[in-house]
Amino acid sequence: MESRGRGGGFLIWFLVTLVLMFLLFTLRSGSEEISFFELKQLVEARQAKKALIGESTVTIVVGIDRASQDSSSVGSRQLYATVTDKNRFTEIANLFEKHGVSYKYVQDSNWLGMLLTYVPFFLILLIWFYFIRSMNPGGGKNGLSITKAPVSLPDEKNKKTFRDVAGIDEAKAELEEIVDFLKNPEKFMRLGAKMPRGVLLVGPPGCGKTLLARAVAGEADAGFLSMSGSGFVELFVGIGAARVRDLFKKAQSVAPCIVFVDELDAVGRHRGSGLGGGHDEREQTLNQLLVEMDGFTANAGIIVIAATNRPDILDPALLRPGRFDRKVFVHLPDIKGRHEILKVHTQNISLDPNTDLFKIAKGTSMFSGADLANLVNEAALAGAKKNKMAVDLEDFEEARDKILAGKERKLVLDDKTKREIAYHEVGHTLVALSMPDVDPVYRVSIIPRGMSLGHTQQLPEKDRYLYDKHRIIAEITCLLGGRAAERAVLNIETTGAENDLKRATELARKMVYSWGMSEGVGLMQLDSSNGEFFLGQSLLQHKSHSEATAAVADKEMQKILTDCFDAAVKILNEKRDVLEKLVRALLEKETLSRDDIDAILQT
């Protein structure tokens, strides 16, 4: 409602300004200045109807002859002349009496000229003041409160503790020391120990970094001041630094407390990488943040917790001892962690007692906490659409398919297109079934979802943290199975393999450039994504290899892709009968589960 009120206020101010400017310039356009001799000629020509004699100006109203050739000039207009010689006023009065022009003396206030001179500037100042007020994050009456930090305070009713955080037990264990310090600072001060001033939470998006920081404050029953890194940077120079000072001033008033800065990389990027050098507003804000973290004492009861997804681009000064000298890595949850997270998010929904959450956790590898929360919500929406009384396993599987592959589309495909899609997907399926090092096939379908016309789902049996060369080769071979089926069986090449080729090429590139898994390049690490260095204000990309080495690497990538494609073609040719059976069954049912596939393989 506040944003609407501000928007409506701006519209009113804008309309009032337009109306006033229009009226002023309309008045100005109705009065035209002429020379004294032109005025005298008009009076002698008996075109003046009446006149006003002021202290420094003489104004006459001129009537326009209706027989004039300029038809647009019919009516009257007001003309005025500025008189500098006061001896001429007697001559002017005699001139008016001689030619029968009625006149009178008035006090020359020149109010119109003053309005035209000062009112536009006054209106501009008012509009500028309105913009200053609208940019005030606190909504206060003082326009200078734009320098106040837009701090977010948590709702006491929704206070979080470690019981609300699941799936990241290692990170919680590291932060329990912070909680203990905030609860019992004397325990550490007695031995002369100093707690870290800053803790940096590092991890992929959606892993619960913000929730973890709130849980630390809730567990320690301490204050919690939250602010986004982008909230420091503003249009005006110096506002970011002022907000940093205000943030730490507020923190000192409510200590002990947690100061949480989300997305620290928005303000803490490596200095010298921008075009503004040391005068860049973001760099001034970062400098002030470094000064403030040095300014408060270690036992002041203030601990700064920051979160980022990009620790590699942070300025080294932020990470030195005395600032953010402790890193806590928040990883994607494993199968046990996903199970615990699902328990937390299903507490507030009507869940079917027969729903196996561990089975759902097993089929959601690489899902973050936010992904799992979204999965539970999508499952509840799917169950509500079917008017169910409780959410069951079918709803969770439908929600997972929607998240991974997209929503089902009602496309009418002709038989030829369906047949091509079926061969493509069965190519993936049959190659995956023949490779022992890949995840087992869970489902294959030719029902369009999202951007794809068909999909083959593989669900891992366990979480994997390390991949060997044989498994990566098997993954590439499976990805090329669809194109292999198109070329080997149908003798065509369709656009359906675009995403497969992209993923396969990326894996081959990492094998050669990053993982040292090619014979031609050997153990040389060619990936220069981390080979950036700063020189003055320019960011230069350090190239760690020659053009000849790059040519060899490209040939190695091509060799890996070609060998994997040939292996996929060989598998499909050897199992052509099984391929045809699976295609016929897929065209008939449109979706085959793992049980359906096993039944076909046994016949």
Image (cartoon, rainbow, N blue to C red):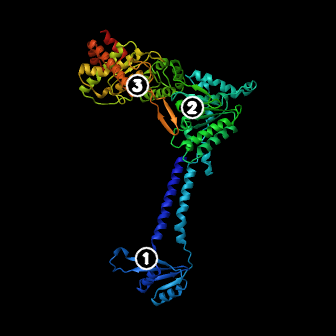
Q: Earlier in the sequence, mark 3 or mark 2?
A: 2
Q: Is residue 385 above or below residue 100?
A: above
- Establish if 476 lies above or below 216: above
**Residue at left 48%, top 29%?**
531
In this rendering, the label closer to the viewer, 3 or 1? 1
Q: What is the three-letter code of the residue carrying label 2? A: Ala
**Measured along the vertical axis of the image, is residue 570 above or below residue 16?**
above
At horizontal 52% and vertical 48% (from top left) the residue drawn is: 4
Q: Earlier in the sequence, mark 3 or mark 1?
A: 1
* Depth order, front residue of 174/65: 174
Give me the residue at 51% from left, 50% from top. Answer: 7
Q: Nearer the viewer, mark 2 or mark 1?
A: 2
Residues at circles 3 and 2 in contact by the CB criterion of under 8 Å = no
Residue type at the position of mark 3? Asp
Task: Say what amino acid the circle numbered 1 marks.
Answer: Arg
Q: Which residue is situated farthest in the top direction here?
A: 602
> Contact, CB < 8 Å: mark 3 with mark 1?
no
SS label for mark 1: strand
Tell me the residue that label 2 is attached to: 307
